[in-house]
Amino acid sequence: MSSRSGIANLPLHGGKAPRWLFQRMVKLAGAVTEAVIYEYGADEFLCRISDPHWFQAFSCVLGFDWHSSGTTTTTCGALKTSINPEKHGILIAGGKGRASRQTPHEIKDAGELFSLSEKKLDELVYSSKISAKIDNSCIQDGYQLYHHVFFLTEKGKWAIVQQGMNESNKYARRYHWLSDSVKNYINEPHTGICCDLQEKKSLDMTSDLSYDSRQTSLDLILDNPEHLKKYFQKKPQIEVKQANLDKFCPELTLPSHHPVLDTDISPREFEVLKKAWELQPESYEELVSLKGMGPKKIRALALISDLVYGDRPSWDDPVKYSFTHGGKDGFPYPVDREVYDHSIMTLKDALEQARLEKKDRYQAIKRLENLIGPDNN
């Protein structure tokens, strides 16, 4: 990059990578991955993939347009094509759009290959599903997931890279997970959330600050949600024998429905809350994992927790990293040189050891050096 000050906004780009480029990306992705696994092991490769800095640098080294949302989808696609589970001991499941919905089936297929128990496979499928549920519903930042990739080692460890799209501003946000770092799916589970645009207000039920709100939301369900209807239903029409206000002020128009909260739950949607009460979930994680417990209902319970009990959830955007490495002017945050340099050195070592033709290796290292720039050497 010729200029590394300020921030880099990553627009959503449609279409596909040119075949000539993608073929080379597959070759280079496979070579670098083999070198990383050989030198550091499969677990370390998962750590690298779940590191937003390393992943972004890796995408740039592969030669994909650094300022595009396609750095996520194309890099993951190249890795999935190049990585052989039998050879490398790593399975890559999922993908973009419809391919993401095949993730559970692809994980199950790894059972016999990696000699994983049925119980372990169920846990892995759950990890895939709950991560998507959390990033779509518990973090309400305006980005709808459209890409989900699950990296699985033969020992049963995993990493997740998924990306969401904001329809209004046409930018992307990437979410990173690592099994070794997840102590609790509900509380601060990410290794990084990447986006150059920080939203002014985002509901984050995974924040430490939302702990009380999570507990109160669960209690509201366990205590029969029937008493919550008053917060959502339309107020009844009261017949009064007096002149209407609009006779005195014809221009005045008032809404027929004015809910207490900024959300509406239909009778059909309310049945989901009743079914949740019947199941009596033991934790907030179990509550949000139930079928039908989507963003609207999670948001409604959070708002009631605040309104009635004063247990305010976090409204701070959880985004932690820029798609690049920050800015020298400190915006959106200062460059973490130690992490940055560590990412670069690992990639450079991998490139030096990768089984590539001399020309391909030279061009990849040159792209890496262009990414570093003279000020970071």
Image (tube, rainbow, N blue to C red):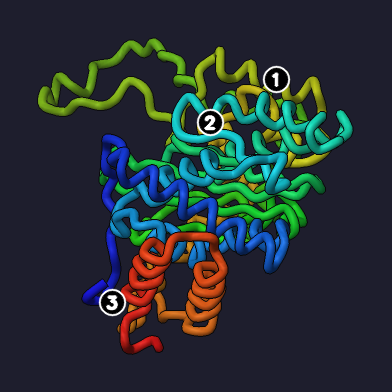
Give the mark toward the camera: 1 or 3.
3
Check the image and report above or below for 276 versus 49: above
Give the left or right position of residue 45, taking residue 140 as reference: right
Q: Secondary structure at mark 3?
A: loop
> In which quadrant of the rendered image does the N terminus lie?
bottom left
* Residue 231's disc number: none
Q: Position of residue 188 (x, y in %)?
A: 65, 58
User: In the image, what residue type sits under mark 2?
Assistant: Ser
Measure the C-alpha gap from mark 1 to mark 3. Answer: 53 Å
Residue 373 location, quadrant: bottom left
Q: Residue at x 30, y 36 (%)?
A: 16
The residue under label 1 is 274
* Residue 100's disc number: 2
Q: Nearer the viewer, residue 230 or 156?
A: 156
* Residue 4's disc number: 3
User: In the image, what residue type sits under mark 3?
Assistant: Arg
Residue 216 location, quadrant: top right
